[in-house]
Amino acid sequence: MIVSASRRTDIPAFYFDWFCERLRDGYVDVVNPFNRKQVSRISLKPEAVDCIVFWTKDPAPMLGGLDKLSSYPYYVQISITPYCKDIEANLRPKADIIKTVQALSRRLGRRRVVWRYDPILLNGAYPIGFHLEWFKDTLEKLAPYVERCIISFIDLYAKARKNTQGLNLHELSEAEMEELAAGLSQIAKGSGVTLQTCSEKMDLGRYGIGHGACIDGGLVEHITGKPVKVGKAKSQRPLCNCVESFDIGAYDTCIHGCRYCYANASAEKARQGFHEHDPRASVLTGELTGNEKITVHEG
């Protein structure tokens, strides 16, 4: 079983101590986001977990607790983008986060630290030229510490469209994606960092940018030395190449304040979910009432 921690929230940044407690207790309860009376009890015993995939914008809280993960294969994906407080309100300075990623890579190695440049969005403050210049500068700092950079262009889902009002964003045209891909590819050439896309229909292979996966079966096999026995994730978008996993996060609980985030209905709901977190609970936010139907997954 592959555990995703998490597409729905930033567990490493905000809930890492809770996650380590769940490892100690050997399980985590995950509430169905569409039906609170349905709960999945996911085994976190080392023999049940093939790999953990972490998603974060700031892995700083992990650094002092990596020893608590020593019984588990895992890798860490870090989203580092060029936006300021107008779009990513509550993040630490990017220069400090980059130093943290460098420190993490020294501990884990380049292959187990993946840089996500996601999402790429355009407006008057963040034109194509700005992205290319920022990517060049950041790649110089990260190339010795990562093997892969996964890029994705913004999809303005209903939540994102609502939360980004006033930013004058637009869905990128094919011409804009082509220009960005060509520029990013040229900058990355010779750096030792492979560029891949995430859930993108457009074929950018002519720029040396292939279709990638975030829950990557090939990377899991490399880390574990064992074949991945699960198939393509059925619950993800049709263009997603990820393999099947159990996500243990909860929507409306991440307080980074990123305006484009699809996992929060609003900043207010995210703060509410964060404040309802009990570090002693088996669920990430709120509590079980006792009348839920619990389905056990042992791997």
Image (spheres, rainbow, N blue to C red):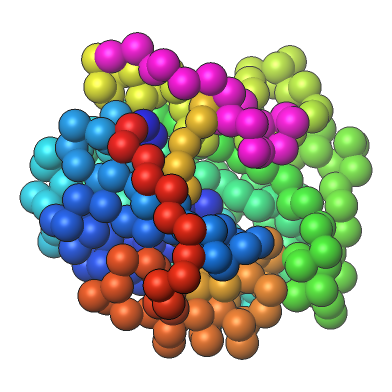
Question: Image quadrant for the C terminus?
Answer: top left
46 lies above or below 123: above
Residue 155 x %, y %:
78, 51
Image-quadrant location for residue 262: bottom right
Q: How many marks?
A: 0
Whether residue 49 can be seen here: yes
Q: Identify the residue at horizontal 24%, vertical 75% (top origin).
A: 280
Magenta run includes residue 229: yes
**Magenta region, residue range:** 226-242
Residue farthest front in this picture: 291
173 lies above or below 159: above
Q: Identify the residue at horizontal 58%, vertical 30% (top origin).
A: 233
Residue 178 x %, y %:
81, 32
Whether residue 76 can be seen here: no
Magenta run includes residue 114: no
Residue 70 x %, y %:
11, 42
In this view of the protein, which residue sits in the foreground, 220 or 202?
Answer: 220
In this view of the protein, which residue sits in the foreground, 37 or 99?
Answer: 37
Q: Is residue 239 left or right of residue 145?
A: right
Residue 191 x %, y %:
44, 28
**Which is the main secondary structure of the residues drawn in magenta?**
loop
Question: Image quadrant for the N terminus?
Answer: top left
85 lies above or below 212: below
Q: Identify the residue at horizontal 20%, vertical 42% (top origin).
A: 45
In this view of the protein, which residue sits in the foreground, 268 or 117?
Answer: 268
Q: Identify the residue at horizontal 34%, vertical 18% (top origin).
A: 221
Image-quadrant location for residue 199: top right
Image-quadrant location for residue 20: bottom left
